[in-house]
Amino acid sequence: MRARPVPADLSSAEAAARWAVRLDGDNVSDEERRAFEAWRSRSAENAAAYERALAAMHVFDASPEDASLDALRRAALRYQSERSWLGVRAAAAALVLLFAGLGALIVAGDGSNLFRGGPVASLYEKGAADYVTRRGEKLDVTLPDGSALTLNTETDLDVVFDGRRRTVEVLRGQAFFNVAKDPSRPFVVVAGGKQIVAVGTAFDVRLDQGRVEVQLVEGHVVVENAEPSGSASPPTRDSTASVHLNPGEALVATDKQVVRAAAEDQERLLKWRDGLIEFDNTSLADAVAEFNRYSAQTISIDDPQVAKLPISGVFRTNSQRKFLEAVTSLHPVTIEYRGTDRFALVPR
């Protein structure tokens, strides 16, 4: 069997993950084993990275029911599908790239921390975030510090913890944060050029096409301009650019303006955590846009008069059919099918 070369541009951690998967499989050729030994003996860094990759695989084998690890598996599986890796165990090995950034500790047989060398690159740089939901999915996650997160549909989060701060970047979508108290390490959520700084509090962050919306439920947060990427310093305060939020308040920020106001109906806006959407005299255009976040079958409205029609009610995010039944019973509109996954609301 001809050995498949490991790309030369991979980091030690990435190459180690590939070797760990390849050697764990069947029908490993002598040529491949010689190539592996040559790579491992090339540097102490390569040898240490391979030990970390094996340790990561053992952690996954020993924790098949862990929800946080399952979220990481799914992130790596998405990366795997894009790069044509070699199966589910490839995902487990790839996650060696995530463990240090998440603050997980994998300990070698002698009790030493295998990640003593410091943080490694997140898989997001290679095309996958640390925690991912697809359309229509919802995910509950507990971070290493005890903070609890709930991810809404089509949400990507990147997580980096170190000794000075806890950072979560919302790359897209929406998440609710219930932050564990740790005064020595601020909890910072970065989204759309803004950062939300907290210690122990509960709040919701939604990033949608450059628009950042923050809903504060309890505690206190400061919303300010995000620090440059890669900054290792604790968050600093700029009173001219900071907005302090109190419970029940909301903030909406775009490139052009930042608006702080009392939340109109926070309980209604946060029903997504229970798998619900509530509309209160909402235009059909806005209601349809919200439902399209959750379903593979998209609804469109071409007629501006139909778009303005109001809708009220509570609907399950996974029950688009019930929503459409309500719309067609309340208003003189009908459904026009425009393909397998597309249909429109048109005048009856």
Image: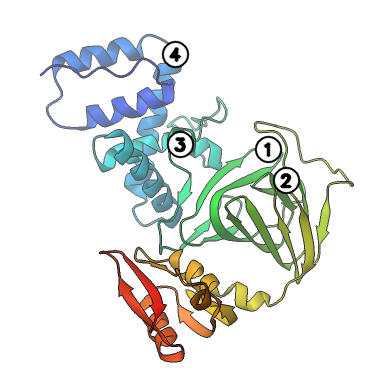
Q: CA distance from mark 3 to mark 4?
A: 23 Å
68 with respect to 182 (left or right): left
Q: Is residue 194 above or below residue 204?
A: above
Q: Position of residue 56 (x, y in %)?
A: 39, 37
Quadrant position of the C terminus in the picture: bottom left
Q: Earlier in the sequence, mark 3 or mark 1?
A: 3
Q: CA distance from mark 2 to mark 4?
A: 33 Å
Q: Is residue 119 above or below residue 58?
A: above
The residue where tag 4 is placed is: 44
The residue where tag 3 is placed is: 123
Q: Nearer the viewer, residue 254 or 151?
A: 254
Q: Nearer the viewer, residue 67 or 325?
A: 325
Identify the residue shown where x is 33% and y is 13%: 39
Quadrant position of the N terminus in the picture: top left
Please tell me whether mark 2 or mark 3 is closer to you in this view. Answer: 3
> Which label was assigned to residue 208?
none
160 with respect to 295 (left or right): right
Q: Are marks 3 and 1 in contact (CB under 8 Å)?
A: no
Q: CA distance from mark 2 to mark 3?
A: 24 Å
Q: Position of residue 265 (x, y in %)?
A: 68, 78
The residue where tag 1 is placed is: 163
- The quadrant in which residue 102 appears is top right
